[in-house]
Image: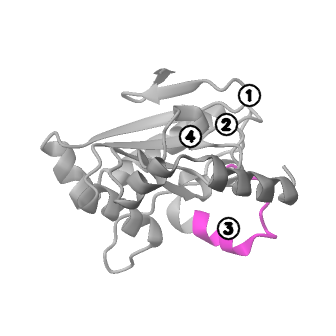
Amino acid sequence: MDFRRLIERAREHATTRPKSVGQQLATGQQPTVLFITCADSRIVTSAITGAEPGSVFELRTAGNVIPEYRLEAPSSEMATIEFAVVQLGVSEVIVCGHSHCGAVSALHGADIGHLPAMRRWLSRHARTGASAADPALREEGKQHVLEQLRKLETYPFVRYRAMTGDLRVHGWFYDIETAEVLTSATASFQPL
């Protein structure tokens, strides 16, 4: 989509959305889900889930990376997760990885020397692995989701709300080629 079309769509949206929707949204947000996914432009949360405005709180970060919980070194990701879980009281958290992920590719040997901030971010917050046989990085992407879930479950407020049964945490994997969504109840992924 070129930039002019983006502007046209924004103008259309302002004139076609019912005023009642805007009035409802202006009263505040009450999402039930925190959706943590990659910043990749091919991942469109509302297209995948059919979510309406106000129902999903999104955190998009390179490679859906969740940093370790370290209160002495807070990050925007930590703050966003805290806000969604503690302030908004979401009842579901989804960590959604995807095939063909550039960040996962970098973790498995792709050269990102020209992206020093990305290289440093990934080296501080994600594990590297051996070169991948599958160019779509499906297995590597699924393992990456599981690693992010393990880190998320160390956040004290996530752990507490999950322990009390007020919060459920899910791992999803979106295949860009097929649009299939897989979920992980354990270490294996199954169709949703």
**How far, Cα to Cα, is label 1 from label 4?**
18 Å
**x and y, in percent, of residue 145 in the image:** 50, 42
**Residue drawn at (72%, 40%) of the image:** 100
**x and y, in percent, of residue 61 in the image:** 56, 59
Q: Is residue 40 visible?
A: no
Tag on residue 99?
Answer: 2
**x and y, in percent, of residue 103 in the image:** 66, 53
Which coloring applies here? one colour
Tag on residue 46?
Answer: 4
**Residue drawn at (46%, 28%) of the image:** 183
Secondary structure of the residue carrying tag 3 is: helix
Q: Residues within 10 Å of mark 2 (few under 14, many from 20)?
A: many
**Residue drawn at (53%, 68%) of the image:** 124
Q: Residue beneath label 1, please? A: 177
Q: In front of the other: label 3 or label 2?
A: 2
**How far, Cα to Cα, is label 3 from label 2?**
20 Å
Q: In front of the other: label 1 or label 2?
A: 1
**How far, Cα to Cα, is label 4 from label 2?**
18 Å
Q: Residue beneath label 3, please? A: 119
Task: Give the mark, 1 or 3, whose residue is nearer the N terminus.
Answer: 3
Magenta residues (range): 108-122
| Left or right: residue 189 compared with residue 136 | left
Q: What is the three-letter code of the residue carrying label 4? A: Ser
Residue 83: quarter of image: bottom left
Task: Give the mark, 1 or 4, whose residue is nearer the N terminus.
Answer: 4
| Left or right: residue 3 compared with residue 69 | right
Check whether the beta carbons of the residues at disc 4 and disc 2 lie within 8 A of each other. no
Q: What is the three-letter code of the residue carrying label 3? A: Arg
**Residue drawn at (21%, 44%) of the image:** 162
